[in-house]
Image (cartoon, rainbow, N blue to C red):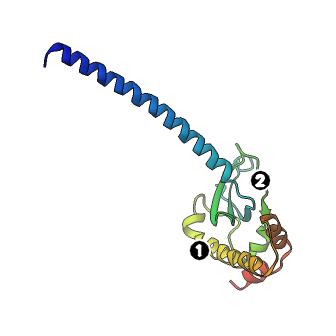
Amino acid sequence: MNRYDKKNRLQELNQEIKDQMKRLVIEKKKLEVLEKTYEHEHISELPILMFIVDETLPMPEDEYDRNYELVYYLPDFDEVKFIYLNCRYDKPNKRLPNTLDLTEKFESYGMPKHIFPGSIRPEYYIKVSDAVSNLIQEIDTIFSTKEITSWEEVGNYLKHSEKIKTLTENN
């Protein structure tokens, strides 16, 4: 290969690199837009707060260093969400937007009020799964027997329903 061929080949490669970099920038912007759209649309219309568990380690400053794990069911995504709050950095009453607090209705499941940090998922997930299963059954019943047109109506019905307590007392 003579030097002109090599020089031309290097220029072509350099141009390909520049073109590829431009395509990467464009694709990265597309990805960012998709991620923002996903985050915007992945906000539940009816997050149902089922359990609040204190995961604070006993220590002298535990009034300042309170840690909680909040267990939500997001019925519009059929998803369980665990949110960990450290009161040093988060507000102790911080909730997801439009939260329906049904913690009193799920007390009979026997979820402990205080556990070792991080043990809610492996040790108590069966209780969470049972609570979610009963909640799903109740929501399915509401949709099949009532004239419900929105998640807000489902929330209002669940808030005033005594049937959830009845379901949980059987466990």
In this figure, which residue is indicated by the disc labeled 2? Answer: 97
**In the rendered structure, which amino acid carries the disc numbered 1?**
Ile
**In the rendered structure, which amino acid carries the disc numbered 2?**
Pro
Q: Secondary structure at mark 1?
A: helix
Examine the rendering and report whether any part of residue 161 can be seen.
Answer: yes
> Of residues 89 and 59, which is closer to you in this image?
89
Query: Which comes sooner in the sequence, label 2 or label 1?
Result: 2
Q: Is residue 86 above or below residue 155?
A: above
| For residue 94, side relative to residue 16 (left or right) | right
| For residue 116, side relative to residue 144 (left or right) | left
**Position in image of residue 41 (x %, y %):** 67, 52
The residue shown at (79%, 57%) is 98
**Position in image of residue 167 (x %, y %):** 73, 82
> Of residues 88 and 30, which is closer to you in this image?
30
* Contact flag, marks 2 and 1 (Cβ < 8 Å): no
In this figure, which residue is indicated by the disc labeled 1? Answer: 126
